[in-house]
Image (cartoon, helix red, strand yellow):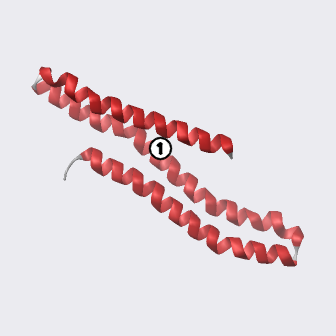
Amino acid sequence: MADPVFWASLGVSLSIFLAAIGAGLGIGITGPGVAGATTEKPEVFARSFIAVVLAEALAIYGLVVALLAVFKLPMIVTTSATAATAEKSELYSKVVIPVILSEALAIYSLIIALLLVLQA
């Protein structure tokens, strides 16, 4: 249970999950207030809508933290692979596969983040 990749992946998952929960709660609290204020005074919509945008920013911060953690994930795997191949050089072909997989995970995360940003 002391696998560093497991703990790093858990941290990435929790970063996204908790940030989305926090953003959802913030939007759920501020959204009805903005809707109520806008029905009474439509001219305050732009100023009051900022509260919803700021609540949504929490999810973006969580995504940024998760991406930063994902980009650090290959370093953890690479360190383990380097130690394993230093002891037994014949293990190189077996230990390089997790490094490649973690790099692919980082690239997929970057692509998803870019798609989310460009579609907004």
Check the image and report above or below for 26 versus 110: below
Q: Give residue 25's quadrant in the image.
A: bottom right
Task: Point out residue 4 in the picture as x, y percentages from the top left corner.
Answer: 25, 46
Q: Nearer the viewer, residue 117 or 50?
A: 117
The residue sitting at 78% across, 78% down in the picture is 36
Q: Residue most toward the left? A: 87
Q: Residues within 10 Å of mark 1 (few under 14, many from 20)?
A: many
Side of 94 relative to 61 (left or right): left
Q: Give residue 88's quadrant in the image.
A: top left
Task: Point out residue 24 in the picture as x, y percentages from the top left corner.
Answer: 58, 66
The residue sitting at 21% across, 22% down in the picture is 93
Task: Point out residue 46 in the picture as x, y percentages from the top left corner.
Answer: 82, 63
Q: Give residue 85's quadrant in the image.
A: top left
Total numbered labels: 1
The residue sitting at 38% across, 39% down in the picture is 72
Side of 8 relative to 50 (left or right): left
Residue for badge 1 = 67
Task: Point out residue 116 in the picture as x, y percentages from the top left corner.
Answer: 61, 44
Q: Amino acid at mark 1?
A: Leu
The residue sitting at 84% across, 69% down in the picture is 44
SS for tag 1? Answer: helix
